Amino acid sequence: MRIVAMTRSAIAVMLILLAPAVGCAAPAGAEPPRRYTIDELEVVIMISPDGTVRVLEKIVFNFTSGNFTMAYRRIPHYGFEELREVSVHNESGDMLKSGSTYSFDWFRGVYEVRWTFDPILGPANATFLVAYVYRGAVTQVSKDQDAIDWYAVGPEWEVPIGHVNVTVMLPADYSNSTLLRTSPRNMDRLFTPMGTFLFLNRSELPARTPVRVVVHFPKSVELSVSWERYLRENWFLVAMLFFGITLLVFALNSVIRVVASRFPPGSPRPDKRLHANPAKLATLLDGRYTPGAFLSGLVAMGRAGTVRMAHDPASDDLLLETREPEDVPGGHDATVLAALAEERSARGLAAQWPGLRAQLQRLCRMELKYDGMIRFSGRLPVAPVLGGLIPLILGLSLLGVLVYADQWDAVLWGGVLLGLSLMGATILVVGGVLTPNRSFRGAREVAVQRAFLAGIATRLEETAASKPAEFAAPFIQFLPLLVAANAGKRGRLPELLRRISSAGPGAPLDVHWYDFLDRSAGEPGTAGWFGRTFSATSQQLPAMLATLPEAAAAEPVESGLYQDGPEGAAPPGTTGQEPPERRNRG
């Protein structure tokens, strides 16, 4: 059987003594010690058919010494909805000035009932009749039973009580019912047509000794409990509410990120800011920091006019020529340009790559860590980690203070603190580890860049169809870009190369190509090159493209133009021999 404690009234009557009355026999500057006991406490609990509980208490004080003018009691807000209709009378039936206030004591809601009276100088006796009404003090413990659980004397009473008499009045005659049960079991019973009366008597009750009365009776009241009361009285429910809301937010965030990353916009609009950001462009090409991505970033800089890739006939090398921009570019551009413009001279791409790789990696991680383009293994989000650890540690610490201070019945804020701890743990685990590192913004930028690259390929192909010779120079600059981002069109690229190579002397037959070793080859970031004539390259490219994995149509190629074979092996379609003019070059 499920028993729910619904009415817990700590009727700890605490008397506050005001200034002593004039004519007090105590010496000047001092007052007699204030002491009191309770000779008698009678509590009558009347349960109405609508579930309202009316309480009448008769308290007989024995003021042994001191001057008393006011009294108050605190009733913890637990087990009922509302306290109202408070009144206090003296033994003559005169109504005293009284009232109730609501406050928080150690994070608990507390009703405080106060009343004042004419000064009473001990030794003397005084009797007060305190009446009030509880709303929502009856609960349903089963489909056939209601219950009331009441502390006639709470554990906070600090003085002994000579005699305690508790009477519970039920709304009907339950003499023939087997559902009537009481605790303590030895309560006297009286059945009348007006209702059922239950009696409990205690004598010589020591201080801090509670008297609890629990009565189960046949269901006769329609009950409803507000959500506010559930939250106030159930710390576990409060904690689960915090936990559930946080978990739901992260779950929705994860779903949105996954869907957004897999279904980017069908017709993206170009973002001009991305075209001026070579580091971001390079990262968005394949989401990794590969030499091919860096080369693509340089191509983007070439389109912006800050760097140009050119063939140097004297050295038979592909050079990067930089120029000082009129306007200072952004942070990414400035970093890349500063490295490229070292000593203000043209430098080869192979010489520039090792130093720039770390710079680009650091900047791109700072810029793109929430854009969804960096692999999970490459980072641990700092914000979710800090956002999770702080409430986790703070919540558990404050919760420990409450428990240590023996204030665990502070259910509302105890639940809030536990919920705060669970919320922090959720942020730490879900946000810092499990939530996909993808975003709609990242998916949109990828779609934009792919559309941008597809446009470049289309324009180049249109130029090649009408003017093959003029197509050679831009195609040389954009070939790595096209291979990395448009692998699905690789069947058309060899044909374009053949048309260019057969165009005649207008085609630059001695341009040197660059390729970068696959990271799995053992030298990550090392730049390698192979010297070819343009005609030889046009013959090799079909075989080179054929070695790319089929997945390259959907995913960018990490290793550049071709996959390396065994160590020392030549690229597919080559003889493994360098051109004579390159063999002895360091």
Image (cartoon, rainbow, N blue to C red):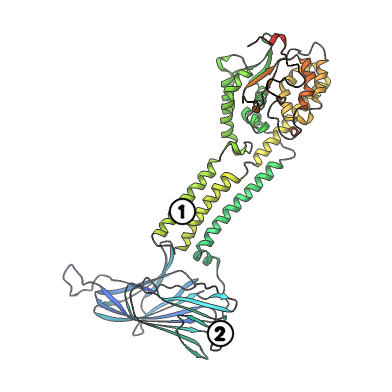
**Quarter of the figure with the N terminus:** bottom right
- Above/below status of 169 relative to 15: below
Q: Residues within 10 Å of mark 1 (few under 14, many from 20)?
A: some
Question: What residue do we see at 58% from left, 55% from top?
Answer: 245
Q: CA distance from mark 2 to mark 1?
A: 47 Å
Residue type of the residue flagged with mark 1:
Leu
Left/right of residue 176 with respect to residue 78 in the rendered view: right
Taking the image as drawn, is residue 229 in sight? yes
Task: Name the spot of residue 333 as percent of width and height, x first.
Answer: 59, 26
Residue for point 68% across, 27% down? 559
Say if mark 2 contacts mark 1, CB within 8 Å: no
Helix, strand or loop at label 1? It is: helix
Look at discs 2 and 1 and give the one toward the viewer.
2
* Nearest to the observer: residue 227 or residue 553: 553
Instruction: Please state the horizontal and vertical placement of residue 158, each as a whole percent of the image.
Output: 33, 72
The numbered dot on residue 178 is 2
Q: Is residue 454 above or below residue 473?
A: below
| Percent x, y of residue 581 | 70, 8
Residue located farthest toward the bottom when viewing the structure as drawn: 193
The residue positioned 81% from the left and 24% from the top of the image is 462
| Residue 106 x/y as whole percent | 40, 61
Pick whichever of labels 2 and 1 is earlier in the sequence. 2
The residue pinned by badge 1 equals 396
Left or right of residue 26: residue 264: right
Residue lying furthest left: 27
